[in-house]
Image: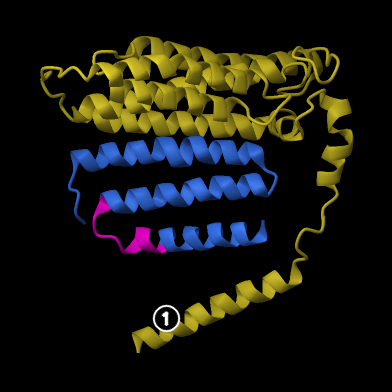
């Protein structure tokens, strides 16, 4: 009896979803806001990458919320792991020469790629979140490969806090200059150059540092706890 | 190109189903990683390189590593 009810419910839900999909035209622009961003985005924000101009100019407040969510998630993980008592340090077994040298050789390249990603966020695909994640995966490589190299937790926290503060301060500067939170008050510059798009590169650098240090902090907490 | 994308979607579906039915959690995590990786490739083919990069770096690399670390701390079998 119960199963029949579940099946009927599932059928009703599937019918509803199917009917609503038949009404939506696929790949046809229904809203005008998308084409507005594509037409006016470069003129209004100076960022050649349209995605960046939406994420950090038209919808910058949403991005602040996203960064806050990530911050709270990292904080919650730290709070949970802080209740588990830390094990006494075991003797570090040094990894083989090939593994540790390979990790040390690859790490700067991953770091440079991550930094490139968030510095050129307004010109090429990519941005602060992606760059930060790439930097954190570089730290993950070092954590797995070279067991004697560890990050300074206090420096991680300081970087994270400072980057978040820069984001909010830039937002309040926009409020003070023009009356809108996160207003793009700096000169737009010439599109397609590195120093363009006003506050967008500055915010992306801050987000890159923040996300990178946050994710590296999560990896640090988990690996230190599990050793 | 269409055949390649269809093949990728098929592999992604198989990996997603196997991620549900594996009782060895490490295998399930690797299946999840395969799903993320193919999702990243498909995002690239759908002309969304931004999302593809985020998916590849977070979904395929960091989440897998975090799950593996968590499995090392807890039980491997479901």
Which residue does the image show at 37% across and 25% down from the upper left?
Answer: A140
Where residue A139 sits, quadrant-wise, is top left
Quarter of the rendering occupied by the C terminus of chain B: bottom left
Q: Is residue A21 above or below residue A104?
A: below
Q: Is residue B54 above or below residue A152?
A: below
Q: How is the image coloured?
A: by chain
Which residue does the image show at 40% across and 15% down from the upper left?
Answer: A105
Q: Name the residue beneath numbered marker 1.
A: A6
Residue nearest the observer in this picture, B23 or A43: B23
Which residue does the image show at 69% across and 17% down from the upper left?
Answer: A201
The spot of residue A207 in percent (x, y) is 57, 22
Compared across the picture, whether B46 is left or right of B29 comes to right
Q: How many marks?
A: 1
Where residue A5 sits, quadrant-wise, is bottom left
Is B22 a magenta residue? yes
The spot of residue A91 in percent (x, y) is 11, 17
Binning the other alpha carbons within 10 Å of mark 1 as few (below 14), some (14 to 19) or many (20 upward) gives few
Q: Is residue A157 above or below residue B5?
A: above
- The kind of secondary structure element at disc 1 is helix
Mark 1, chain letter?
A: A
The chain drawn in yellow is: A
Residue nearest the observer in this picture, A9 or B14: B14
Where residue A122 sits, quadrant-wise, is top right
The spot of residue A78 in percent (x, y) is 32, 28
Q: Which residues are magenta?
A: B17-25
Quarter of the rendering occupied by the N terminus of chain B: bottom right
Which residue does the image show at 78% across and 25% down from the upper left?
Answer: A47
Whether residue A217 is visible to the viewer of this picture, yes or no, is: no
The chain drawn in blue is: B
């Amino acid at each position: 009896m119960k199963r029949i009810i579940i099946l009927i419910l599932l059928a009703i839900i599937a019918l509803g979803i199917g009917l609503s999909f038949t009404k939506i035209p696929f790949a046809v622009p229904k809203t005008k806001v998308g084409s507005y961003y594509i037409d006016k985005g470069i003129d209004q924000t100076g960022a050649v990458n349209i995605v960046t101009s939406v994420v950090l100019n038209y919808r910058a407040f949403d991005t602040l919320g996203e960064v806050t969510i990530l911050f709270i998630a990292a904080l919650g993980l730290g709070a949970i792991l802080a209740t588990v008592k830390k094990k006494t340090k075991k003797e570090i077994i040094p990894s083989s020469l090939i593994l540790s040298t390979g990790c040390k050789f690859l790490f700067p390249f991953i770091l440079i790629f991550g930094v490139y990603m968030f510095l050129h966020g307004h010109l090429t695909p990519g941005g602060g979140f992606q760059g930060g994640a790439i930097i954190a995966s570089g730290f993950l490589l070092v954590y797995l490969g070279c067991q004697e190299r560890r990050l300074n937790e206090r420096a991680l926290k300081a970087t994270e806090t400072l980057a978040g503060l820069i984001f909010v301060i830039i937002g309040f500067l926009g409020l003070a200059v023009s009356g809108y939170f996160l207003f793009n008050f700096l000169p737009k510059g010439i599109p397609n150059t590195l120093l363009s798009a006003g506050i967008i590169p500055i915010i992306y650098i801050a987000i890159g540092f923040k996300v990178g240090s946050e994710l590296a902090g999560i990896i640090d907490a988990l690996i230190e706890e599990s050793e | 190109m269409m055949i390649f994308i269809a093949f990728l979607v098929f592999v992604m579906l198989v990996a997603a189903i196997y991620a549900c039915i594996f009782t060895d959690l490490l295998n399930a995590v690797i299946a999840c990683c395969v799903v993320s990786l193919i999702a990243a490739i498909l995002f690239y083919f759908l002309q969304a390189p931004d999302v593809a990069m985020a998916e590849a770096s977070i979904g395929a690399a960091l989440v897998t590593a975090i799950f593996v670390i968590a499995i090392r701390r807890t039980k491997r079998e479901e």
